[in-house]
Amino acid sequence: MPRQIVLSRFVVGIGLLLSVTCLGQNEVIVREKPLRAQTLAGRVQLGDSPDGVKGVLVEDCTSDCKIVKASTRTYENGHFNLSRAPNKRMHYLRLSHHGAETLLIKVKIDRSGQKELALVLSFAT
């Protein structure tokens, strides 16, 4: 009897472990072509929804994304502002949110660029 209990708990544990690991996979989407913007500020949407997404983590990283230099989260309406990011021309942003694919983009600071970034995350599959 105790052996059956241990065996059934083991099987249930393995089943739970497999269900958690198979629920969803987060892919990383890399946009190779740099966006041009006047500042590191903008708005984040999820999918086709016109509404902004609150709580998206926006990080300014090194080119290999191993070191985060500055970060913030989007506000109620999906807006963010990385005003404390280092003053340089090229930035490497990583955007992540639960239920969405991680987005890696390059942003070139340029006076002729768009005033604010308009970024769209894709739903995780």
Image: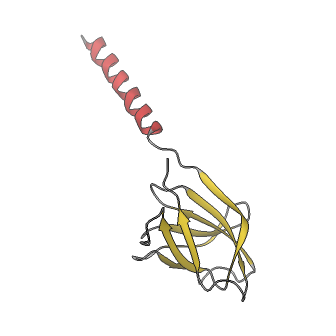
Q: In this view, does 83 lie above or below 44?
A: below
* Residue shown at 67% from the left, 64% from the top: 67
Of 118 and 103, nearer the camera is 118
Residue at image coords 54%, 55%: 101
The quadrant of the rendering that contains the N terminus is top left
64 lies above or below 72: above
Coordinates of residue 63 in the picture (x, y in percent): 74, 64
Measuring from the top left, give residue 116's x and y in whole percent.
59, 82
Residue 66 x %, y %: 68, 59
| Residue 51, quarter of picture | bottom left
Which residue is located at x 44 percent, y 32 percent? Answer: 18
Identify the residue at image location x=34%, y=26%.
12
Looking at the picture, does residue 104 appear above or below residue 39? above
27 or 5: nearer the viewer: 27
Q: Is residue 55 left or right of residue 84?
A: left
User: Residue 3's x, y, as percent?
Assistant: 30, 12
Q: Quadrant of residue 2?
A: top left
Number of disc labels:
0
Residue located farthest toward the bottom when viewing the structure as drawn: 111
Most extreme residue toward the left, as rendered?
Answer: 1
Q: Is residue 114 left or right of residue 15?
A: right
